Amino acid sequence: MKIGVSSYSFKKYIVQTKCDYFEICDKAKEMGFDGIEFIDLDNKDFAITQDPMKTAKEIKEYCKKIGLDIVAYTIGANFLAEDKEAEVERLCRAVDVAAELGAPVLRHDVCYALPSDPLYSWREAIKDMAPNIRRVTEYAKERGIKTCTENHGYIFQAPERVEALIREVGSDNYGWLVDMGNFLCADAEPAAAVHIASRYAFHVHAKDFLFKSGKEGNPGGFFQTNGGNFIRGTIIGHGIVPVKNCVNILKKAGYDAYISVEFEGAEECLPAIKRGHDYLRALV
């Protein structure tokens, strides 16, 4: 396995210093990462240019120059949007950005909420979304890019839901971005969830959380899980996610691609990312 880092991990540093993505690439290389993934190149606050395709080309050239792999491109998506055709078109344009970037994997969300109809469940959502997800991944396959969905967002974080979605889409080009920490948002045990997810894994995020039982209440700065508990991001290896166990499960399943550090804790940004790198490096 190789170790990557999400540009999202540097969010605090970007906001504080107003640096661009080139400096983030330099920081990742200095820390010892093998690769980097990017999120939303059309984000006007962080973009190098106002044109995502131009930004992608410039980043690709710069990463090649410094010897840093580009491992994934990550965007939001809502396949339950009112204008579904427009959303499919937007996702296909994101595939084009990923191709320009040289990223082999595009990760997209699937939805952020369900309709208010009490009879409409996540199972109905899967049936409605799967055909359009399939259209996007078929387009991506033509460009040599795999697509995947992360266990992310309150609707599709539980492992059984993501697995059902992937099986309904039914494409060998569509899989799972396995975030070992996010399973806690659905109150699922991370190692057991990674065991389910590992057979579908196209990419992996290493993430860790501090945990407080719902019986204790929110001590401040934590957010609530589906089951009423409280978690807060932290340095990888400092929380309750059994990262070593998750890595070993992935190895046993034959996963040998990238694991990316995704840090979203309250600690100081750059030291936290570096510690996450060093912790993972010792495991892989």
Image (cartoon, helix red, strand yellow):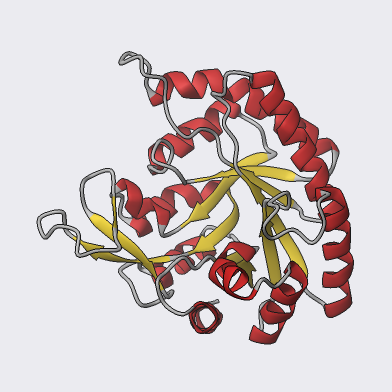
Expressed as whole percent of the image width and height from the top left, the position of residue 150 reads 53, 47
Q: Is residue 15 visible?
A: yes
Quarter containing the N terminus: bottom right
Total marks shown come to 0
Q: Is residue 30 left or right of residue 250?
A: right
**Residue 236: image location, x then y, percent:** 43, 74
Q: In the current view of this chain or complex, which residue is farthest to the left?
A: 215
Q: From the viewer's perspective, is 142 left or right of 173? A: right
Residue 79 percent coordinates (x, y): 58, 27
Compared with 160, 101 (above or below) is: below
* Residue 256 seen in render: no
Of residues 59 and 159, the one drawn nearer to the viewer in this rendering: 59
Placement of the C terminus among the 4 image quadrants: bottom right
The image quarter containing residue 102 is bottom right
Residue 124 sits above or below residue 69 on the image: above
Residue at image position (65%, 23%) is: 132
- Going 67% across and 27% down the picture, which residue do you hit? 87
Instruction: Give residue 211's quadrant in the image.
Output: bottom left
Q: Is residue 148 above or below residue 264?
A: above
The residue located at (63%, 76%) in the rendering is: 17
Image quarter of residue 219:
bottom left
- The x, y position of residue 185, in whole percent, is 34, 50
User: 114 or 106: nearer the eye?
Assistant: 114
In the drawing, does residue 139 fall left or right of residue 232?
Answer: right
**Front residue (pair 122, 266):** 266
